[in-house]
Image: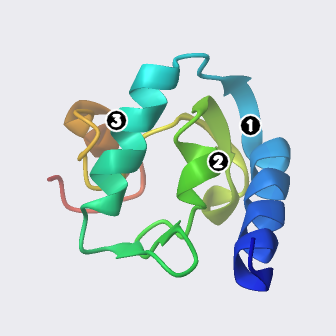
């Protein structure tokens, strides 16, 4: 494992521990979420982060509910901010709360 990979894993693990409210416990869904993110143009492959929400994808994909650090640690259903995890309804709910245009 390279230094960068090790650093990203440590940061991802720490973010997961800090932000997780409830684990997903669904390895298949987690794998689908990761694959969706890896295929997205907003995926930062070098750091394995989303360029939109800044989350570490490997941590976020395995969380059912989380604390959103960009929203004063508001507890949310974990979702893709662009609705790409087949969760457009959830993404739009938070976009509405934040005064953003709906998808």
SS label for mark 3: helix
The residue at the point 24 percent across, 74 percent down is 41
The residue depicted at 57 percent of the width and 62 percent of the height is: 55
| CA separation in Å, label 3 and label 1 | 19 Å
Name the residue that disc number 1 marks: 20
Sequence-earlier tag: 1 or 2: 1
Q: Name the one closer to the observer, 18 or 67.
A: 18
- Specify how the rendered protein is coloured: rainbow
Q: Are marks 1 and 2 in contact (CB under 8 Å)?
A: yes
Residue 96 visible in the current orientation: no
Q: Residues within 10 Å of mark 2 (few under 14, many from 20)?
A: many
Q: Position of residue 12 (x, y in %)?
A: 73, 59
Q: Is residue 68 above or below residue 44?
A: above
Q: Which residue is more in the foreground, 6 or 52?
A: 6
Q: Residue at x 84, y 48 (%)?
A: 18
Element type where label 2 sits in the image: helix
Q: Quadrant of residue 92?
A: top left
Name the spot of residue 68 as percent of width and height, x first.
64, 51
Classify the position of the N terminus by image quarter: bottom right
Residue position marked by numbered label 2 in the rendering: 59
Q: Which mark is on residue 95?
A: none
Q: Which residue is mark 3?
A: 32
Please give left or right for residue 3 compared with residue 67 in the image. right
């Amino acid at each position: 494992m390279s230094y960068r990979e090790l650093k990203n894993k440590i940061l991802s693990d720490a973010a997961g521990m800090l932000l997780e409210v409830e684990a997903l416990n669904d390895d298949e869904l987690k794998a689908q979420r990761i694959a969706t993110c890896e295929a997205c143009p907003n995926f930062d492959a070098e750091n394995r982060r989303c360029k939109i929400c800044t989350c570490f994808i490997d941590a976020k994909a395995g969380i059912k509910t989380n604390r959103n650090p960009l929203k004063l640690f508001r507890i949310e259903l974990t979702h893709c901010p662009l609705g790409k995890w087949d969760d457009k309804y959830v993404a739009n709910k938070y976009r509405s709360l934040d005064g953003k245009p709906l998808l």
